[in-house]
Amino acid sequence: MEYFVNIIGNVLEALYRTCGASLVIAVLFMCVYLRVRKHGVGPVVQGWIREFRTDSLFRRQFFLTFYVCMMLFRTLFCRPIWGNPLENVLGIWGFHEPDGSIYTENIENLILFVPFVLLYFWMREEKEHNKKKPLQAALMRSVSVSFGFSLLIELCQLFLKIGTFQLTDLFFNTLGGLLGGLVYWGFDRSRKRAEEYVRRIGGWDTEVWEAPEGNWTALAGQAETAAAAAPNEAAPAGQAESRMPEEDEAQASSEATAPSDSGENAALTSEQENAITTLIREAGQKLRQASPAEDTIHQKEGPANFVTDFDTEIQKFLISGLKKILPEAEFFGEEDTEENKGASASGEYTFYIDPIDGTTNFMFRYNHSCVSVGLARREQMIAGFVYNPYVDEMFTAVRGKGSFLNGRKLEIRNRSVTEGIAAFGCARYNDENVGVLFDTVRELFDRSLSIRSGGSAALDLCRIAGGSNVIYLETKLQPYDYAAASVIIEEAGGVITQIDGTPVTLHEPCSILAGTELGCSETREIFLRKSGLGGEGSADGQKE
């Protein structure tokens, strides 16, 4: 009978000791099984690998989960059961047990919680920005996280009778988390100070940064090549040919036969164009991987007008990279950052930057936002780049070379509003003539195949070049909203003007009407009629 009781007891104990871990593993396995049964093994595995390769947040969450599981197996899942969890509440505070043997569990717990907090902060960095917080705030956050997780483990041991509840575990676990927070906060600042010191001692006028993905080494090589070629391109027209490399003579000859606007203003080399495209793709990956949170969103002037920390970060990133490619350029960006001259930018070259066009979409994870960069020379737009990282669509155009979408040449067919989609935009902080706008949209709804408002003016404008939209209408936009797209539309064969037909401006906001020649003519007539300027005045306005 004694043998039988021992056998039954050992079997039940073996089953119970693994019950918690088995339950967790079984639930996770069945979640995976349900997904595999619905989609198949291949798509699930491929989807996991794709997320792990492309989504930095997914990778961080995976590594944190993996480490937490290892900690739980050590602290909770593999402990003796049915003991008295309160038999040693105070624990052992020294380095020796009562019998004189060495006791190291406290130091082990401390060491285990250092990487736990490091991984937690790393995973939450895009939302909490612990690197940028004051030391006291970062340390308080690390204490709260490590103490909370440690307390959860101890309470499970207490109420489930798995192991023992000990105050020493709480103390040393929390102390380890505190050290982890200090390391995380201090390492980034020490690295930046070391970089600044090295740059100052070496005399290098560079800014060290790290792209989230992609090969910056290749981009740097392109940027250096482009920067070396830039002085020749910026030379007076009479000296340009003598300073141009021999291999570009054929291109210079072809540009000399082009219209004067194209020949005079097409000042981007292929190296510069490729470097800008690569840089914008890098910025797009920053946008795609960003996770907006409440503490990263800030109110700007006007109702429902927002800016996020990611807008500012991406604009700084673009300005830093573009200065390497075209050092003499000035910048007109949406956000208030260093070296952004805004509407007062008046250099021979000016970049128009909207780091996140469609900020409200971005805030609500609508996945319909883009990075928009346009380049003007002597008050004339000569290049445009618009990138939607969520679907990997890169619209590009250089004056005189055509418009392209991911390398495919774009050409607009002159269609009527009745033959396609009419798009429009509006914003509460730009409500000028909004009543007339909606009256116009109501009539466009009756005439067109459908209407759209995507929340990103740059993307909706580029969809004209791509053939998706026939027209795009908005009563007030800033130059950085439409500068890049204007080149893309015109090089594809479309038109872009203000609603009354006058040219768009590059230093102040204006209305926008873009699309096919026929579609713009029809939409202009509707808008002017709805605003009370139809009839004779409307016709004259169109002729002008």
Image (cartoon, helix red, strand yellow):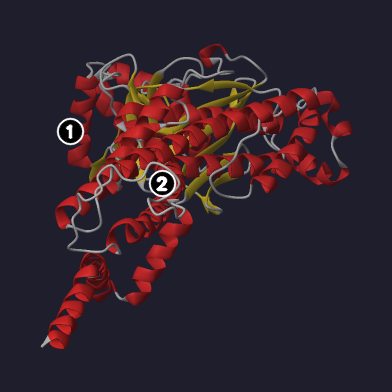
> Between 511 and 389, which is closer to the camera in this rendering?
389
Quadrant where the C terminus is found in the figure: top left
Q: Decide if residue 291 is on the left or right side of residue 221.
A: left
- The spot of residue 57 in percent (x, y) is 41, 48
Q: Describe the element under mark 2 as helix, strand or loop.
A: helix
| Nearer the camera: disc 1 or disc 2 | 2
Residue 387 appears in view: yes
> What's the residue at 59%, 18% (across, down)?
339
The first of marks 1 and 2 along the sequence is: 2
Q: CA distance from mark 1 to mark 2?
A: 72 Å
Disc ID at residue 106: 2
Q: Describe the element under mark 1 as helix, strand or loop.
A: helix
Q: Decide if residue 256 is on the left or right side of residue 69.
A: right
Q: Are marks 1 and 2 in contact (CB under 8 Å)?
A: no
Q: Is residue 470 above or below residue 503?
A: below
> What's the residue at 55%, 43% (across, down)?
282
Q: Is residue 377 above or below residue 411?
A: above
Q: Amino acid at mark 1?
A: Arg
> Between 204 and 101, which is closer to the camera in this rendering?
101
Q: Quadrant of residue 263?
A: top right
- The spot of residue 541 in percent (x, y) is 37, 19
> What's the residue at 46%, 21% (across, down)?
335
Quadrant where the N terminus is found in the figure: bottom left
Toward the top, the furthest residue is 344
Toward the left, the furthest residue is 1
Q: Quadrant of residue 519?
A: top left
Mark 1 = which residue? Answer: 442
Q: Residues within 10 Å of mark 1 (few under 14, many from 20)?
A: few
